[in-house]
Amino acid sequence: MRVKRLALTNFRSYRELELEFTPGPTTFIGNNGSGKTNIAESLIYLAYLSSHRVANNQPLLSLGSDQAVIRAEIERDNRTLQVDLEINAQKANRARLNGNAVKSQREILGALQIIYFSPEDLDLVRGEPTDRRNFLDKLLITQSPRLAGVIADYDRVVRQRNTLLKTRAPLSALEPWTEQLIRFGAELSAERVKLVDDLNPFVGEHYRNLNEVKPASISYKSSTEGLTADAAHNIEILTERASEVLKQEIDRGASLIGPHRDDLHLQLGDFPAKGYASHGESWSMAIALRIGSYTLLKSDGADPILILDDIFAELDNQRRQQLTAVTQLAEQTIITTAVESDLPPELLSAKFYVTPGKVSSVDG
């Protein structure tokens, strides 16, 4: 899989930008604030329908604009797809596949598969559970785009159910939302459990490859004991637990069971990574999670694009070399950096230089 062309209109600092990409690594070099990460962000948004930097659409739009457009020509499976996404601040986004409008923007999920690295990846180790849940859910969507609907439905149900709990609505009003929370939550929990089980050996292997001494492992930490990769089993467990905590939920005005309260547990040796890992170990774990995700997708027959967003400046030579080795496995890698000398010398790539609102090739 690779992106052949990318066009941006009113996206961040780019009123109009058109780029052509070649296979292999492509590097965008520019000072902080020049707009190089905006290019990476546009591709990440196209892959996940969300940004890795902001929570809503407004900051994605050029100043004074009410919409932005990302258009990409993607080559995969010996065919070419054109994906157009119109991003709106005040209304739903709209999308097209090969020029044809689709009913929901979620229909373009899967057209572009990406694994990305960024300085924020340290939050996977040191941050809050929501960072790790988001990591798992994005990987699930990359694996199986239909799960975006399950995740969106589950989030909607939790919000509505919490509103009813806070207003002390009658049990008759709460019951159908509880049933939906259990149904969607059971499926999402099952998918996450399976994903973590599949990902764990890859994480351990890549952590060892960084010459770290302690063994690394990951596991799914649910707020409800006994959940498995079997959704039907999870329905039984969550149904029983829901009746046990109902009074507490009414008292607290919040849903107390379900995958919105779960976490990805990261283990280094005998201790949890959070709170015990050194700075270097934290980076090694974050890299192992990302490279592990990439190799898991490759083992499933996918060929995702790699994005390394301003990451080399954060790493020592050994960890830089590990990332460089992964770029040799990918058909296409997009790299951003502020300082050209941060790039490993063995990394050969096409180069673009970025100044505010403008991108020029190394040839001029």
Image (cartoon, rainbow, N blue to C red):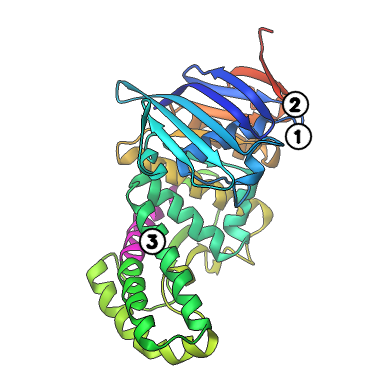
Mark identifier at residue 153: 3
**Residue 112 visible in the snapshot:** no
Q: Earlier in the sequence, mark 1 or mark 2?
A: 1
* Residue drawn 54% across the image and 39% down it: 87
Q: Determine the residue positioned at 59% across, 27% down.
A: 9
Residue for badge 1:
33
Q: Which residues are magenta?
A: 187-205
Q: Quadrant of residue 259?
A: bottom left
Residue extending furthest toward the left: 232
Instruction: Sort mark 1 into few (<14), some (14-19) or many (20+) by Cα contacts within 10 Å.
Output: few
Inter-mark Cα distance, 3 to 2:
39 Å
Question: Overall secondary structure of the magenta stretch?
Answer: helix
Between 15 and 241, the one lying in front of the other is: 15
Which picture quadrant has residue 10? Answer: top right
Q: Is residue 210 left or right of residue 64?
A: left
The three-letter code of the residue at mark 3 reads: Asp
Q: Mark 2 = which residue?
A: 356
> Which element carries disc 3, helix, strand or loop?
helix
Amino acid type shown at disc 1: Gly
Mark 1 to mark 3 CA distance (whole Å) = 36 Å
Q: Is residue 355 above or below residue 45?
A: above
* Residue 315 point in image, percent of width and height: 66, 41
- As displayed, is residue 126 above or below residue 341? below
